[in-house]
Amino acid sequence: MGLTLDHLIFGNGHGMKSPYFDNRLYWLVDTLRQERDGRNGRLYTYMGGFGAQLRSFEWTHPRPGERRELNGREYIAFSSTRSWLRVDAAWALVRMPPGLDEANAEIRAIKAELDAML
């Protein structure tokens, strides 16, 4: 039911309209909590930048300092805002490389890995 509702609200990730623009949705499971069966995954969108790299739409705010391991990388809650019933949460990579070129390469690698999942 939750995934069906998310698809109706946010689109299916293949060209349907999202709230503000066309984007892809990725179903990612938090392996930090050993949730490997996929039932407790969430929908994320990619937003490449030096602040936050992923964005999710959830029913509740993430706990302060909450960490999730998604697709082999660890992310921490960056910010969250409530919009009507849903929470728009941004997630930042925990160990971003210190150099500008290395950080850009890491951000591009995140996007490439997410696109390879579709």
Image (cartoon, rainbow, N blue to C red):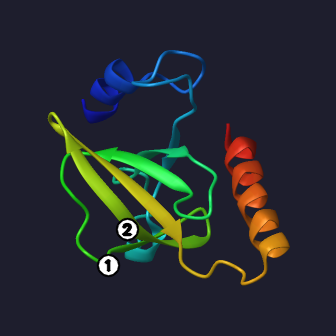
Quarter of the picture holding the N terminus: top left
Residue 11's place in the image compared with 53, above or below, is above
Q: For the residue labelled by badge 2, is the local secondary structure a helix, a strand or a loop?
A: strand
Q: Circle 2 is placed at which residue position?
A: 77
User: Residue 104 at x, y = what percent?
Assistant: 78, 64
Q: Circle 1 is placed at which residue position?
A: 65
Mark 2 and mark 1 in contact (Cβ < 8 Å)?
A: yes
Residue lying at 72% horizontally and 84% vertically, measured from the top left: 98
Q: Amino acid at mark 1?
A: Gly
In this figure, what is the number of numbered marks? Answer: 2
* Mark 2 crowd level (few <14, some 14–19, many ≥20, 10 Å Cα): many
Q: For the residue labelled by badge 1, is the local secondary structure a helix, a strand or a loop?
A: loop
User: Residue 40 at x, y = what percent?
Assistant: 34, 54
Quarter of the picture holding the C terminus: top right
Q: Which mark is residue 17?
A: none
Q: Amino acid at mark 2?
A: Ala
Residue lying at 44% horizontally and 23% vertically, measured from the top left: 18
* Mark 1 crowd level (few <14, some 14–19, many ≥20, 10 Å Cα): few
Q: Nearer the viewer, residue 48 or 5?
A: 48
User: Residue 10 at x, y = what percent?
Assistant: 39, 26
